[in-house]
Each structure stands twice: as C-alpha cells, then as structure tokens.
Amino acid sequence: MLFQLKKRNPSSFFQPEMNFPGVEETVEVKDQRITERLWYMGFSKKHLETLQDLNPVISPLLDELL
C-alpha cells in the first residue's frame, strides 16, 4: 500500500494545559480590562521582557511584517 494510516497511541495526542500567571508575574497597565485580558492570555512579565529585548530587531521590520 502506498499510504498507510499510522495508529496513534492515545498518550501521543496533544494535551493542552491552562496555566495562568501568578499575581507577581502579571503585567499590569492603567486599563484594568486590558490587565485582565493579559492575565487571561497568560501574558507574563517574562513575555514582556522578551518583547522589549527584541524591540531593536523587530521595530525596523514592522512595516514589512504587518
């Protein structure tokens, strides 16, 4: 047979986890609704630091990327 379907082991399926950042890791902004959205998306201070570190590299490319 040219194509064979491979049986998957049930443990090989993707198992997503919902992890929300703790209060000390949460990014806070002036608008409380945005702060709540950032928390719900799991956006933490570590993510913010990474974006800030990448800013010099990404900023010149933004027009082309968007």
Image (cartoon, rainbow, N blue to C red):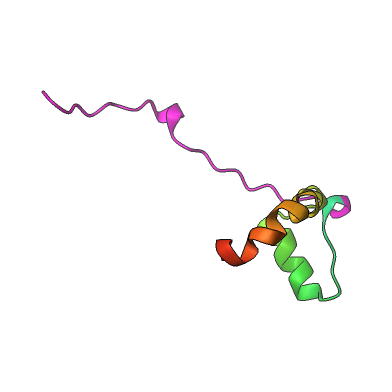
Q: Judge from the rendering whether residue 38 lies leftward or rightward of residue 65; answer left or right.
A: right
Q: x, y percentage for residue 5?
A: 22, 29
Q: As rendered, which of 56 and 46 lies closer to the eye?
A: 56
| Image quadrant assignment for residue 58 | bottom right
| Image quadrant assignment for residue 65 | bottom right
Identify which residue is drawn at 84% across, 69% down: 29
Q: As rendered, which of 65 and 16 lies closer to the eye?
A: 65
Q: x, y percentage for residue 56?
A: 77, 54
Q: Residue furthest front?
A: 60
Q: What is the chief secondary structure element of the magenta stretch?
A: loop
Region in magenta: 1-24
Q: Is residue 37 rendered magenta in the image?
A: no
Q: Judge from the rendering whether residue 10 lies leftward or rightward of residue 6; answer left or right.
A: right
Q: Judge from the rendering whether residue 63 lies leftward or rightward of residue 36; answer left or right.
A: left
Q: As rendered, which of 21 and 4 lies closer to the eye?
A: 4
Q: x, y percentage for residue 41?
A: 67, 58
Q: Residue furthest right?
A: 24
Q: x, y percentage for residue 66?
A: 56, 66
Q: Is residue 22 rendered magenta in the image?
A: yes
62 versus 10 height, above or below: below
Q: Judge from the rendering whether residue 14 lies leftward or rightward of residue 19; answer left or right.
A: left
